[in-house]
Image (cartoon, rainbow, N blue to C red):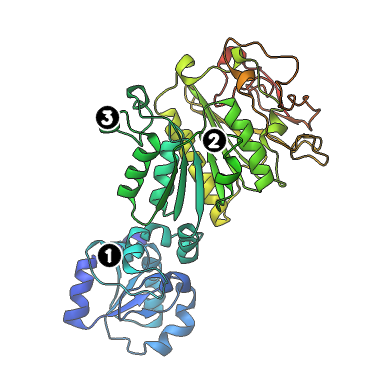
Amino acid sequence: MAGKTRSREITARDTHQSIEARGALLLDVRSDEEWRLAHIPGALHVPLSQLDARLPEVAPDRKRPVVTYCAVGARSLRALPTLDELGYEDAVSMSGGIVAWQELGYPVESESGLDAEKRDRYSRHLLIPEIGEQGQAKLLETSILLIGAGGLGSPSALYLAAAGVGRIGIVDDDVVDSSNLQRQVLHSTAGLGELKARSARAALEALNPDVDVVTYEERLTSENVDRILGEGWDLIVDGADNFPTRYLLNDASVWHDIPVIHGSIYRFEGQVTVFKPHEGPCYRCLFPQPPPPELAPSCAEGGVLGVLPGVIGSLQATEALKLTLGIGEPAIGRLLLFDALAARLDEVQVRRDPDCPVCGANPTITGYIDYAEFCSPGVSRPAGAPTGQSPAPPQPDAAESTAPSGAVSPNTVPYGAALPTTTRESQGKAR
């Protein structure tokens, strides 16, 4: 029966000719939401689940040729046995559905608030029930700030721009260097020596003119963090590469109530999680203070597989889209650990620390701390804080949950990096 039904398919081109030559009835069997987003002019809309009850009334002529269609041709095939039972003598299905119809350049109509150009650009989003017109409109209204336009910021920025995020901010004061190009796909050889923020803006605007790209050609500091975060950002994607920025961003995001999508990489390993203020843990819940410099190698010191930032940055972009759309299960309270060599993704469950010095019930840190001297290689950690700075917070006894075998030790995870194997615990607990 399946093979027999499959033989009753015609192409979108043949459908177009059949409508003109034979006066065929085009029957849209998709949902109401899909119909509102885009449909073929002149088509009759009867959802698949309502064919039995409604079709005989709205299409009484059983001898008229009927061509069913849906998004890509699966549901329209399933409609044929029902039409046979109802007595329609000449019913076929359009293979490829409305997607194939649009690819041939045939017209569609829409009750959507999106114009024709946007419906075409984001058509694959519009076909997904979890996104649809409302979701795409939400993306176009969303503002996401990226800290860094390097290895992690590159894939995140590209995919967020392609998805139609309406406003993207980029904070970066560095310039494009030849050693960046092995992994920072947002930039090119032609941009060597150019500020990364400017190079990134040019690439994103060329990719999608719908996106408003705002650049900050400066390093995130305690002097500018409130100004930058106060400019209406819904989410932050953290692609920074040093401990001082990571802790500064964490504290500011908690006080500004902005979720942060955290990513970090080292050699063949990466980590992703979501820090959502007042709902899940913050960065200090996991790592109350920076590790010693010898446990915090940079990519320049330890290296990184060029494609690894693409994997982790894409996961960060995915989490950002999920949070924006309110779909799926965001990685709040879950630290995802990716091992490229083993092709394995582990997960560590983490919880808020009720005694966290920033997001806990009784915070002890109420101002920004400059950790620059604490994290500089070759500089020993002072017993007290430098003049004018708060001391590093003591490590609290955070709530614990069991981590999988091979989990990264929370007390030694370097900022911006997943630990090398030699510094990992065979079995550990995430705090």
Identity of the residue drawn at 68% across and 38% down = 282
Q: Which mark is residue 189?
A: 3
Indicate left or right for 144 with 90 as reference.
Answer: right
Q: Nearer the viewer, mark 1 or mark 3?
A: 3
Toward the viewer: 46 or 41? 41
Q: Gap between marks 3 and 2, in whole Å?
A: 26 Å
Residue 304 in the image: state x and y as whole percent. 44, 21
Label 3, residues with CA under 10 Å away: few <14, some 14-19, many ≥20? few
**Which quadrant: the N terminus?**
bottom left
Q: Nearer the viewer, mark 3 or mark 2?
A: 2
Q: How many numbered badges does the structure rendering display?
A: 3
Q: Earlier in the sequence, mark 1 or mark 3?
A: 1
Cβ–Cβ below 8 Å for labels 3 and 2?
Answer: no
Residue tagged 2? 220
Toward the viewer: 46 or 137? 137
Please, what is the three-letter code of the amino acid marked with disc 1?
Gln
Q: Which mark is residue 72?
A: none
Q: Earlier in the sequence, mark 1 or mark 2?
A: 1
Residue 153 in the image: state x and y as whole percent. 45, 37
Residue tagged 1? 102
Please, what is the three-letter code of the amino acid marked with disc 2?
Leu
Q: Nearer the viewer, mark 1 or mark 2?
A: 2
Residue 431 in the image: state x and y as whole percent. 73, 29
> Quick check: 157 above or below 382?
below
Residue 18 in the image: state x and y as whole percent. 20, 76
